[in-house]
């Protein structure tokens, strides 16, 4: 048995198990298994690591930063971003952290935005996923600002958005607001100011159209959810787990 899995606090929303289980079946990998590990505390990951058949893990909210002290080392991408969403357990038992969110988001965004775009971005949320989004935007040379309930440094609060909103045409939700089962929640932004010049990207993919995206659609904005990003980062995870 070779085991993989996803760790997080609440995982009922996740498509990862179905995605990888289907992949294992298609590749006839009958000894491969993908499990879900709902951990009320990150310290319980120590028990997960005790399984000698464990090959790799994905990491979701709220543990993408909290998991780092439990790892032996990080690859360059995870070091730069400061968050981990992929863990590979090596043959010697050491655990290395990676970040495939960066690759998944960057590729998905590039696939979606029009060519020769000139756009500024707002990143809603300041958790682990937002860190990967921030680095991807930096590498795409997209000017951006983080919006947080507890701002640090150059970040701004949601109450400051009205004054600056017209300067930013790309709005990216990296928070879990709107994720199933809490489908009626949405980030507190001035939706009444949206129009067809705006692009709304939600890292949430379940439900397919979140409240955030619905409100944007109602105002004529372009919308995209995080499902393609999920697929892209999942394939990157698979490559990491199978690398030497």
Image (tube, rainbow, N blue to C red):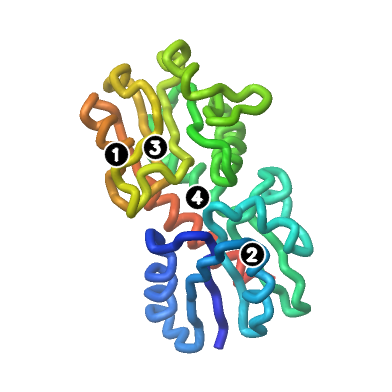
Q: Earlier in the sequence, mark 1 or mark 2?
A: 2
Q: Nearer the viewer, mark 1 or mark 4?
A: 1
Which is more N-terminal, label 4 or label 1?
4
Q: Identify the residue under disc 2.
A: 87
The residue identified by callout 3 is 201
- What is the distance, in whole Å, between disc 2 and disc 4 at their CAs? 16 Å
Q: Could you say which disc has been placed on residue 91 in the image?
A: none
- Look at discs 3 and 4 and give the one toward the viewer: 3
Residue at 75% in and 77% down: 93
Circle 4 Cα neighbour tier, 10 Å, few/some/many (<14 / 14–19 / ≥20): many
- The Cα–Cα distance between marks 1 and 4, rounded to whole angstroms, is 23 Å
- Determine whether 26 is above or below 174 in the image: below
Position of 188 with respect to 87 (left or right) is left
Q: Which mark is residue 211?
A: 1
| Crowding near the residue tagged with mark 3, few <14, some 14–19, many ≥20 C-alpha atoms within 10 Å | many
**Which of these two is toward me, 41 or 105?**
41
Above or below, 100 against 34 in this view is above
Q: Residue furthest top?
A: 163
> Which type of secondary structure does the marked residue at label 4 adopt?
helix
**Crowding at label 2, few (<14), some or many (≥20) Cα neighbours within 10 Å?**
many
x and y percent of residue 38 in the render? Answer: 51, 67
Which residue is under mark 4?
A: 104
Element type where label 3 sits in the image: strand
Q: Position of residue 241 (x, y in %)?
A: 61, 70
Question: Which one is earlier in the sequence, the residue at label 3 or at label 4?
Answer: 4
**In the rendered view of the protein, which quadrant contains the C terminus?**
bottom right
């Amino acid at each position: 048995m070779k085991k993989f899995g996803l760790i997080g606090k609440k995982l009922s929303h996740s498509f990862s198990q179905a995605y990888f289980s289907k992949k294992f079946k298609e590749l006839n990998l009958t000894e491969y298994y993908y499990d879900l590990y709902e951990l009320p505390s990150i310290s319980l990951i120590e028990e997960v690591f005790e399984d000698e058949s464990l090959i790799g893990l994905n990491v979701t909210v709220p543990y993408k930063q909290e998991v780092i002290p439990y790892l032996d080392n990080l690859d360059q991408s995870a070091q730069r971003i400061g968050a981990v969403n992929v863990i590979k357990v090596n043959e010697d038992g050491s655990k290395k952290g990676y970040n495939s969110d960066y690759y998944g988001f960057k590729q998905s965004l590039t696939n979606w935005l029009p060519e020769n775009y000139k756009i500024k971005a707002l990143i809603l949320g300041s958790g682990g996923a937002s860190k990967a989004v921030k680095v991807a935007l930096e590498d795409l040379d997209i000017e951006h600002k983080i919006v947080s309930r507890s701002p640090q440094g150059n970040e701004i609060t949601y109450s400051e958005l009205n004054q600056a909103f017209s300067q930013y045409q790309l709005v990216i939700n990296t928070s879990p607001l709107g994720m199933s089962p809490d489908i009626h929640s949405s980030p507190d932004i001035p939706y009444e100011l949206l129009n067809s010049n705006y692009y709304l990207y939600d890292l949430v993919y379940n439900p397919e159209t979140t409240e955030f995206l619905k409100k944007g659609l109602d105002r004529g904005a372009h919308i995209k959810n995080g499902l393609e990003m999920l697929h892209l980062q999942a394939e990157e995870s698979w490559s990491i787990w199978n690398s030497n």
